[in-house]
Amino acid sequence: ASVFAGIAQAPEDPILGVTVAFNKDPSPVKVNLGVGAYRTEEGKPLVLNVVRCAEQMLINDPSRYKEYLPITGLAEFNKLSAKLIFGADSPAIQENRVVTVQCLSGTGSLRVGGEFLAKHYHEHTIYIPTPTWGNHPKIFTLAGLTARTYRYYDPATRGLDFNGLVEDLSSAPLGSIVLLHACAHNPTGVDPTVDQWEKIRQLMRSKSLLPFFDSAYQGFASGSLDKDAQPVRMFVADGGELLMAQSYAKNMGLYGERVGALSIVCGSADVAVRVESQLKLVIRPMYSRTPGDWSHIIKQIGMFTFTGLNSEQVAFMRQEYHIYMTSDGRISMAGLNMKNLPHLADAIHAAVTK
Ligand code: PLP
């Protein structure tokens, strides 16, 4: 008997389920056209040369360690990620209006962005194109937003239903969120022209519609990373705000590593600082935690506990959080109460993730 005996069998994911079925098929002539992953002429997984080279460099670097990263991820990666999509000379980056956090590929970036909006943005409706990547409605609904659709593809012309798109976005409530595929729209392979993008930009800005770009294929549409980023850069150039989810699954061939980033372009550097602080709060209970095992604090007996904090961390906590303990990291449990405990937890977290 199992306490889970009543659980129903869930259906396979419509995309990943194709690979499951493919792997089960013993036929020698089988072909998998379901999953979006590059293959060699022999149908084998392809790892890009640049990725192989980078891996070798990392393996041969003895100074590399596997410590926890800060909640927002690797700072250098975030900087380069923002530069790749917004341009190295982006005024928004130079003005410190861009917050970038490392996320679990494109999916994780969309989810963190969705939860941030559900928590901190006044409008909870997100418009997604029809059709779109099948995961979009699920990600945003689970994040706490309401997904609605706007017309995108016209089966009659096998092209963009530009009039339908304009009509639907024109009738969206002021301030609604609009999901836009940055380039190489999935699944249609149909993108607006630069002129059409400009009209979409003007319409969205005139109605204060908040753009949420999903960039899973930068480089795939034109072969140029910069050219594929042009629609995004048009929206950044007008000084307005937007969200940007980047995936490196496809354009770097890093499907399994789950490498991605969420950027929020804010109206001012001051807002960006506060947005970043709130993004940390979204990420922390989702997949970050204070590094290390702190169960010894509960297991140790008596009045004192040895926290394991070093003298530098102790000094940091005194200076930044006004928490006083001996430099060997010993704390008196008697000094703690329900009121000051969260403050101590925050301080320990800041000290060990600094
Ligand atoms: N967005 C779109 C439009 C996609 O097609 C995909 C992957 O197929 C993703 C986001 C996210 O993929 P991942 O989470 O693997 O980066």
Image (cartoon, helix red, strand yellow):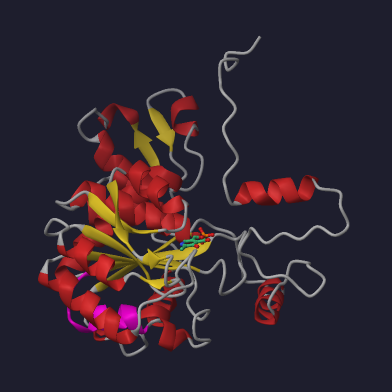
Query: Residue 327 placed where, x, y %?
Result: 38, 49
Q: Compared with residue 25, is residue 84 higher up or lower down, i.e. above or below?
A: below
Image position, residue 195 (x, y; %): 28, 86
Query: What residue appears at the point 20 percent right and 31 percent down from the top-left corner?
Result: 339
Residue nearest the viewer, comparing 113 with 351: 113
> Which one is in front, 122 or 221?
221
In the image, taking residue 29 as reference, residue 317 lies left or right, namely left
Q: Residue at x 42, y 72 (%)?
A: 157
The residue at 80%/57% (across/down) is 30
Query: Which quadrant of the view contains residue 231?
Result: bottom left
Residue located farthest toward the bottom when viewing the structure as drawn: 89
Q: Quadrant of the C terminus?
A: bottom left
Residue 229 is situated, as x and y percent measured from the top left of the image, at 39, 81
In the image as oriented, which residue stretches furthest toward the right?
Answer: 28
Q: Residue 321 vs residue 213: left or right?
A: left
Residue at the outermost front position: 156
Measured along the vertical axis of the image, is residue 29 above or below residue 305? Answer: below
Residue 294 visible in the picture = yes
The number of discs equals: 0
Q: Nearer the viewer, residue 133 or 188?
A: 188
Over which residues does the magenta segment extend?
A: 230-242
Residue 325 seen: no
Q: Residue 45 in magenta?
A: no
Q: Is residue 280 left or right of residue 220?
A: left
Magenta-drawn stretch, dominant element (helix, strand or loop): helix
How far across and how far down the image is residue 171, in percent? Answer: 15, 59
User: Split into 4 quadrants, where in the image is the N terminus?
Assistant: top right
Image height of 104 relative to 284, above or below: below
Residue placed most toward the observer, 124 or 119: 124
- Give the quadrant of residue 57: bottom right
